[in-house]
Image (cartoon, rainbow, N blue to C red):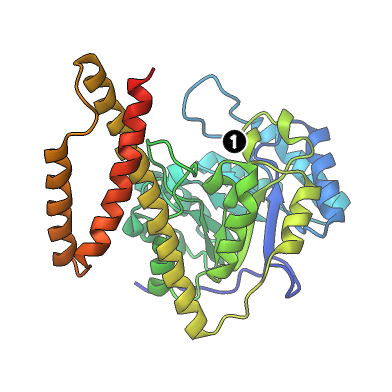
C-alpha cells in the first residue's frame, strides 16, 4: 500500500546543513542533559534527542532513568526553545511521552522487528498528531520495515519518517551495524517522499566513523541525520565510543557537502553506494578467508606439513578462472585476483608457522 504522508515540519534549516537531531545516547542526569543541550543549542541544533528508556542486549546494564528524565526534556524545551525526542517501545512509553509533551518519537530497531510491539504502539497513537521516525529492524528485512511503517500510518500518523541505523551481524567487521545502503535506497523507491535520516553513530559504532558515514548519507540524498552527542563522551553511561562532543559535531556538520541532487546524479550515487557496500562485504569476506588460512597454517604446523601445496593452488586457479568466465569476467582478471589472495594466504600461514 502507498503511505499517506505529510511533511514532518520538524524545524527550519538552511541549505548548508541537513536537518540534524542530536543529543546523548542516554539521559543520565539533569545536569548532563542541560549541559549537552545548551552546547548543542549554541551550535544551531534545534532538535534534541536523549534516550529515556534504553533496551540493552543483556540485563545489568544501564537501562535508562525512565520517566524521571521527561521533566529534564521539558526544561530543554522551555529554557532553550529546542524540540525534544526520545525512543518509545511500549504503550506506557508512548503515553508518558504524550503526557509530557515530547515533540517527536522514534521507534528502535528491536521494537520494529516485533509486529506485536509495533501494533501496540500504533494503537496507542490513534488520534494523535505527532511526528514518528521508524528505525530499520535489526535484520535486513525490508518487508518488516515497511510493515512497521504501514502499522503506524494506518493509526493516522502521517508525519512519518525513517532512521537508517544499519543491520546487525555476529561477525567482527569495520562497522557496528552494516550499512547495506541498497536497502534504504529500495525503501525510497517503494515509498516515494518518505524522509530518511542517517544514523552514523549506530552504523559506525566509533566516533571516528561518524563524519564519513554522515557524508555518505548526504551523497545518497538523505533528508537528515540523527547523531549521538554528549558533553563528556568518554564518561557516557552507554555507547561512549560512538558519541562526539557538540564542538566535534559542529565541525563535522560544517565539513558536510550537501549535494544538489538531480535524478541522474541521485541514481549514480545510489549505484556508487551499492559498490561501496559490496566492497565492504568483499573486505569482510577476505578477512574471514584469511582467518581460515591461519587455521590451516596451524594445522600444517602441528603436522609438519609444508605451507604451499602446489596441486591445491593449481586447482584453485583453474576452478576460479572457469567460474569467473561463467560470470562474465576474464580468466586473466580472476587469475590475478586469486594470485594476490594466495600470496596473502601464504604470508598468513607462514606467520603462524613461525610462532
Asked whether, in this view, residue 313 is left or right of residue 177, the answer is left
Q: Nearer the viewer, residue 188 or 221?
A: 221
Which of the 4 image quadrants contains residue 68? Answer: top right
Q: Nearer the viewer, residue 148 or 120?
A: 148
Q: Is residue 128 visible?
A: no
- Percent across and percent down for residue 229 are 71, 45
Extreme residue in the top direction: 302
Q: Residues within 10 Å of mark 1 (few under 14, many from 20)?
A: many
Classify the position of the N terminus by image quarter. bottom left
Residue at image location 76% in from the left, 62% down from the top: 254
Element class at badge 1: loop
Q: Which residue is mark 1?
A: 53
Q: Nearer the viewer, residue 137 or 205?
A: 205
Classify the position of the C terminus by image quarter. top left
Residue at image location 59% in from the left, 36% down from the top: 53
**66, above or below 50, in the image:** above
Q: Nearer the viewer, residue 6 or 247?
A: 247
Which of the 4 image quadrants contains residue 184? Answer: bottom left
**285, above or below 272, in the image:** above
- Percent across and percent down for residue 117 are 41, 44
Asked whether, in this view, residue 30 is left or right of residue 122, the answer is right
Q: Is residue 240 visible?
A: yes
**37, above or below 26, in the image:** below
Residue at image location 56% in from the left, 51% down from the top: 106
Asked whether, in this view, residue 75 is left or right of residue 134, the answer is right
Asked whether, in this view, residue 267 is left or right of residue 94, the answer is left
- Percent across and percent down for residue 144 are 34, 55
- Percent across and percent down for residue 165 are 51, 51
Residue at image location 31% in from the left, 46% down from the top: 341
Amino acid at each position: 500500500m502507498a503511505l499517506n504522508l505529510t511533511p514532518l515540519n520538524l524545524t527550519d534549516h538552511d541549505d548548508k546543513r541537513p536537518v540534524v537531531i542530536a543529543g546523548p545516547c542516554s539521559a543520565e542526569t539533569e545536569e548532563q542533559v542541560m549541559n549537552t543541550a545548551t552546547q548543542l543549542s549554541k551550535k544551531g541544533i534545534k532538535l534534541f534527542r536523549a534516550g529515556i528508556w534504553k533496551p540493552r542486549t543483556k540485563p545489568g546494564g544501564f537501562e535508562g532513568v525512565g520517566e524521571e528524565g521527561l521533566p529534564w526534556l521539558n526544561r530543554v524545551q522551555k529554557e532553550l526553545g529546542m524540540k525534544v525526542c526520545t525512543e518509545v517501545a511500549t504503550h506506557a512509553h508512548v503515553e508518558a511521552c504524550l503526557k509530557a509533551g515530547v515533540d517527536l518519537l522514534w521507534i528502535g530497531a528491536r521494537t520494529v522487528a516485533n509486529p506485536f510491539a509495533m501494533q501496540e504502539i500504533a494503537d496507542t497513537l490513534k488520534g494523535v498528531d505527532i511526528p514518528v521516525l521508524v528505525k530499520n529492524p535489526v535484520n535486513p528485512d525490508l518487508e518488516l520495515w515497511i510493515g512497521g511503517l504501514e502499522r503506524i500510518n494506518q493509526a493516522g500518523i502521517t508525519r512519518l519518517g525513517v532512521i537508517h541505523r544499519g543491520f546487525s551481524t555476529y561477525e567482527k567487521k569495520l562497522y557496528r551495524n552494516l550499512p547495506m545502503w541498497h536497502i534504504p535506497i529500495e525503501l525510497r523507491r517503494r515509498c516515494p517522499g518518505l524522509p530518511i535520516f542517517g544514523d552514523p553513530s549506530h552504523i559506525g559504532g566509533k566516533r571516528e566513523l561518524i563524519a564519513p558515514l554522515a557524508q555518505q548519507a548526504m551523497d545518497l540524498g538523505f533528508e537528515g541525520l540523527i547523531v549521538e552527542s554528549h558533553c563528556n563522551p568518554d564518561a557516557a553511561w552507554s555507547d561512549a565510543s560512538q558519541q562526539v562532543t557538540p564542538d566535534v559535531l559542529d565541525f563535522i556538520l560544517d565539513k558536510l557537502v550537501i549535494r544538489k541532487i538531480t535524478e541522474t546524479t541521485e541514481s549514480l550515487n545510489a549505484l556508487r553506494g551499492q559498490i561501496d557496500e559490496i566492497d565492504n562485504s568483499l573486505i569482510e569476506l577476505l578477512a574471514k578467508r584469511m582467518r581460515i588460512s591461519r587455521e590451516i597454517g596451524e594445522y600444517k604446523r602441528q603436522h609438519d606439513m609444508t605451507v604451499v601445496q602446489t596441486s591445491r593452488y593449481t586447482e584453485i586457479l583453474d576452478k576460479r578462472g572457469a567460474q569467473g568466465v561463467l560470470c562474465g569476467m576474464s580468466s586473466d582478471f580472476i587469475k590475478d585476483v586469486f594470485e594476490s589472495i594466495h600470496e596473502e594466504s601464504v604470508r598468513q600461514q607462514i606467520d603462524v608457522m613461525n610462532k
